[in-house]
Amino acid sequence: MYTVDMAIQATELRKRLFQILEEVSQGASVDVSYKGTALRIVPAEQSSRLGRLVVRDLGVVVKAGNSGWSAAAKAEWEAEGKKFYGRPGRTT
């Protein structure tokens, strides 16, 4: 997938039409040169990069109430947070 604009000739567009249309649907734009004229193919609706993210199963299961942190590790982590951010409950 291209993340920047790509420029191609009309012949290349014809050869790879469906592949290029798929890339445009993913947010890419394509400049096509046809008989000396520059044409641009862009998606009708621009989507954000976050909107195009694909949800993937990473095999990690976190159960409510059990963060997996040991008490010592959790206390150390909270102490580090207090050092940088002050006491808990502080509003900015």
Image: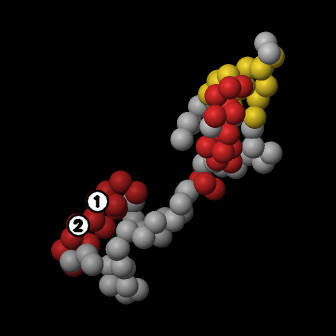
Q: In terms of depth relative to the viewer, which is nearer, 36 or 86?
A: 36
x, y percentage for residue 20?
A: 64, 40
Question: In terms of image quadrants, where is residue 82?
Answer: bottom left
Q: Position of residue 16 (x, y in %)?
A: 62, 37
At numbered mark 1, what does the secondary structure look like: helix, strand or loop? helix
Colouring? secondary structure
Q: Which residue is mark 1?
A: 80
Q: Amino acid at mark 2?
A: Glu
User: Could you say where residue 60 lies in the image, as x and y percent from the top left?
Assistant: 34, 74
Q: Quadrant of residue 53?
A: bottom right
Name the residue that disc number 2 marks. 76
Label 1 environment density (alpha carbons within 10 Å; few <14, some 14–19, many ≥20) = few
Say which of 68 and 90 sits in front: 68
Q: Which residue occupies the foreground of this view, 7 or 73? A: 7
Quarter location, residue 81: bottom left
Residue 23 in view in this figure: no
Closer to the camera in the image, 78 or 17: 17
Q: Amino acid at mark 1?
A: Glu
Q: Secondary structure at mark 2?
A: helix
Q: Is residue 35 visible?
A: yes
